[in-house]
Amino acid sequence: MVRLRLDLAYDGTDFSGWARQPGLRTVQGEIEQALGRILRLGEPAMLTVAGRTDAGVHARGQVAHVDVPEASLRELDGNRGPLSVDERLSALVRRLAGVLDPDVRIYRVSVAPEGFDARFSALFRRYAYRVSDAPCGVDPLRRREVVWHNRPLDIDALNAAATRLLGEHDFAAFCKKREGATTIRELQRLDWAREPDGVLVATVVADAFCHSMVRALVGALLAAGDGRRPVEWPGEVLRRGVRDSGVHVAPAHGLCLEEVGYPGDADLAARAAATRRVRTVGADAG
């Protein structure tokens, strides 16, 4: 068996999230079906992803891995005679581009280094959340990736509230609890910037995210940013450790997984082993 790393992106609008679900169109389901068809796999391909995203959430820096029989890669040789490994993987990228719908793209396929696990080897995930507070609403050409907030937002208040959430905490107040899954996470970065076109972008980085965490954090910060709540409120919710009815989960389409970071090749297996000891059940999700 050969472990392949896939670097990919998708527009989540028309997907029912990442994870395979019977009768629903999902990113995982579409890619696994395409791989099985191209490589003529006897058994279904089984993808492992760095961060499972919810319905409507986008990604431009997603990472996954899949184990395939080495012999299956020879299906890519065609009539051109034996190809090198790099040639086969380049051919796989082209074939996937021809089979997959335009809202999901595999940018690169490579042989994964020893010890690589797309989920457990990751050091961090970086998300961006995009909001417009323009009185007229969102640029129609960006309506699938930018959320309209119909109140003016104060960026200083947003950032003042955000700083109170940084560090390692139990984020139970901002997560949908799953049986056996820890809600302790290290929030490494959370800050807001206003782009030249006026769109506000929150950059959120953590070792991992529990289900709905990013969107719940953003929802709480927006309430502080538009003055409905004091800047201390998100931090107070965090310290109480229980879900607060005042925290509204922000819409999915403003969220995008931008990057997944990994250690050097020599440290991949150790990182994966350490992460598995902490998170045995559950999923990373925005």
Image (tube, rainbow, N blue to C red):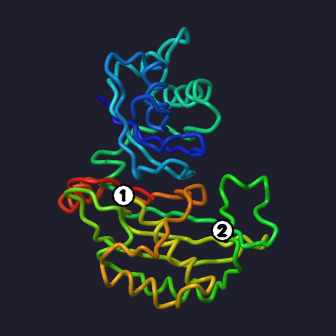
Q: Secondary structure at mark 2?
A: strand
Residue 278, position in %: x, y? 20, 63
Residue at screen point 58% across, 38% down: 104
Q: Local crowd at mark 2 within 10 Å, few (<14), some, or many (≥20)?
A: many
Q: Position of residue 203 (x, y in %)?
A: 55, 71
Between marks 1 and 2 in the image, the one whose residue lies nearer the viewer: 2
Left or right of 277: which side holds 212?
right
Side (left or right) of 53 relative to 145 = left
Image height of 256 relative to 159, above or below: above
Query: Is 234 drawn above or below residue 48 in the view shown?
Result: below
Name the quadrant of the N terminus: top left
Position of residue 94 measured from the top left corner of the image (x, y, whole percent):
59, 28
Q: Residue at x 35, y 18 (%)?
A: 71
Q: Residue drawn at (44%, 62%), measured in percent from left and top? A: 125
Residue placed under numbered mark 2 in the picture:
131
Horizontal arrangement in the rendering, residue 171 relative to residue 60 (left or right): left
Residue type (three-letter) at the residue carrying disc 1: Ala
Q: Which residue is mark 1?
A: 122
Residue type for callout 2: Val
Residue beneath the point at 54% across and 89% down: 160
Sequence-first disc among 1 and 2: 1
Q: Secondary structure at mark 1?
A: loop
